[in-house]
Amino acid sequence: MPYEWVQPDGPDAPKAELHLWPYRSLPRRGFVWIMGMGFSLMLLPLLGVVGTKALWGLLPFGLAALGALWFFIEKSYKDGEILEELRIWSDHMTLTRHGPRGDVQEWEGNPYWVTVQLHKSGGPVPDYVTLKGNGREVELGAFLSEDERPVMHEELSQKMMQLKSHQ
């Protein structure tokens, strides 16, 4: 799953820490294969027109298609550089979202009053998870799949209950 519970250590370390990130279905090595395959498949029909004026009419469109493939896969990689960090101490908790373009968003609340909610319907997607507290409601793990969000909600709810009972 594209999230993990981290075991922080140190005197000021949080009691629990959760890191979430988007799933990568195409690793960089796969990107090289896709571009090579795209180039090879573009080259096949062009072999029949090598030495004619038609080659120069078709070549720009083939190269534009490869360039667009390269651009949009790179854009997808850049958009997927999201990291959400949820840190829970006994007296406060923070959620920090590092966006794909370097923007950072932060939320803070008291774990005793914060509620973890799973919205089954009526929202942007089924089964989305929010943290509600400190006068705000923030979404957690919006990029997770429909199957992963309820599992993460259950784990987070159990962790919050565990931490509240140890206070």
Image (cartoon, rainbow, N blue to C red):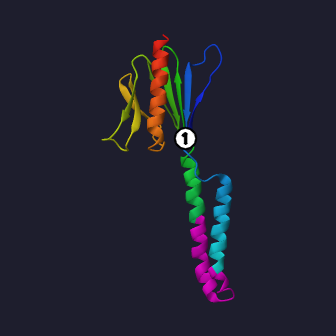
Q: Is residue 92 visible?
A: no
Residue 135 at x, y percent in the picture? 35, 24
What segment carries the magenta color? 45-67
Relative to 71, is 108 on the left or the right? left
Residue nearer the viewer, 135 or 124 = 124
> Which amino acid does the dot numbered 1 rest on?
Ile
- Residue farthest toward the bottom in the current orientation of the protein: 52
Relative to 38, is 152 on the left or the right? left
User: Which structural element holds mark 1?
Assistant: loop
Who's the residue at 58% across and 57% down the image? 73
Residue 94 at x, y percent in the picture? 50, 24
Relative to 141, is 57 on the left or the right? right
Q: Is residue 36 magenta?
A: no
Who's the residue at 65% across and 57% down the image? 30
Who's the residue at 52% across and 38% down the image? 103
Q: Quadrant of the N terminus?
A: top right
Residue 82 at x, y percent in the picture? 54, 41
Provide the residue designation for mark 1.
82
How many residues crowd mark 1 within 10 Å: few (<14), some (14–19), many (20+)?
many
Establish if 48 lies above or below 121.
Answer: below
Q: Is residue 53 magenta?
A: yes
Residue 110 at x, y percent in the picture? 44, 18
Q: Is residue 162 visible?
A: yes
- Residue farthest toward the left in the current orientation of the protein: 122
Establish if 150 lies above or below 15.
Answer: below
| Chief secondary structure of the magenta portion | helix
